[in-house]
Amino acid sequence: MGTLSYTGLISLDGYYNDASGGFDWAMPDDDVHAAVNELERGVSTMVLGRRLYETLAVWETLDLTDEPDVIVDYARLWRDTDKVVYSSTLEDARSARTRILRHFDADGLRAIVETSPGTTSIGGPTLAAHALRAGLVDEIHQFVSPVIAGGGTRFLPADVRLDLHLAETRAFTNGVVYTKYLRT
């Protein structure tokens, strides 16, 4: 059976973005970006909500001329990974290796995870909440920024109980703290 992993860059108070939808405070420096890249290196399928997909689709066509190695690396990872986007409104995919599914289905996601040759990542807090409620998420990775957003979209839903085991931590020089939790 495969692994479903949920990763996010979040505020200290647990928000994925702030009340206005902004997340500029979560932009990683090179060290944090390199750590994110290492996590993504084992991912063979990305499962994304529409909003996150539309944010990340820029990596498909980003001009990599004069970009730092960490950016070039992430662009390659994005382009080499299969993507599944859950959206009832998205008409066409803006990236290669992408398919669109109209509605969340726990059994369908379970099948994606089980048939993926590597780790499956899930992104977007609304979509991830469905997977968490269905008991499908195996790992949670958080890059906690030293900022209090004060509101916005929560990284984790308020109505889920999940027992976890702390598997790893790492502090970065910019104040970001990484934690990896495994489902017990």
Image (cartoon, rainbow, N blue to C red):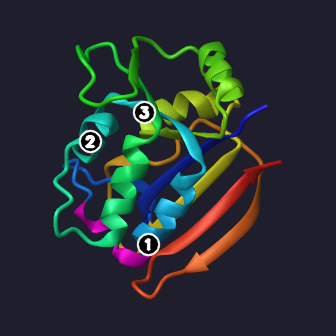
On residue 48, which mark appears?
3
In the image, residue 168 lies at what x, y percent? 70, 69
- Compared to 139, does 111 lie above or below? above
Q: Is residue 27 left or right of residue 168?
A: left
Q: Which residues are magenta?
A: 24-31
Identify the secondary structure beneath mark 2: helix
Q: Residue at x 21, y 59 (%)?
A: 64
Q: Residue at x 60, y 77 (%)?
A: 170
Look at label 3 and name its amino acid.
Leu
Residue under numbered circle 2: 60
- Dot placed on the residue nearer the N-terminal end, 3 or 2: 3
For the residue pair 49 and 97, the one nearer the viewer reads as 97
Residue 79: quadrant of the picture: top left
The mark that comes first in sequence, 2 or 1, is 1
Per the model, the C-alpha gap separating discs 3 and 1 is 21 Å
Three-letter amino acid code at the position of disc 2: Glu
Q: Which residue is mark 1?
A: 32
Circles 3 and 1: CB atoms closer than 8 Å:
no
Mark 1 Cα shell of 10 Å, populated few (<14), some (14-19), many (≥20): many
User: Residue 106, position in %: x, y?
Assistant: 62, 18
| Residue 18 picture quarter | bottom left
> How far separated are the C-alphas under marks 2 and 1?
21 Å
Indicate the secondary structure of the residue bearing disc 1. helix
Q: Amino acid at mark 1?
A: Val
Q: Work out whether 27 lies above or below 50.
A: below
x and y percentages locating residue 51 in the rendered image: 29, 34
Cβ–Cβ under 8 Å for marks 3 and 2: no
Q: CA distance from mark 3 to mark 2?
A: 15 Å
Q: Is residue 72 magenta?
A: no
Q: Closer to the camera, 46 or 27?
A: 46
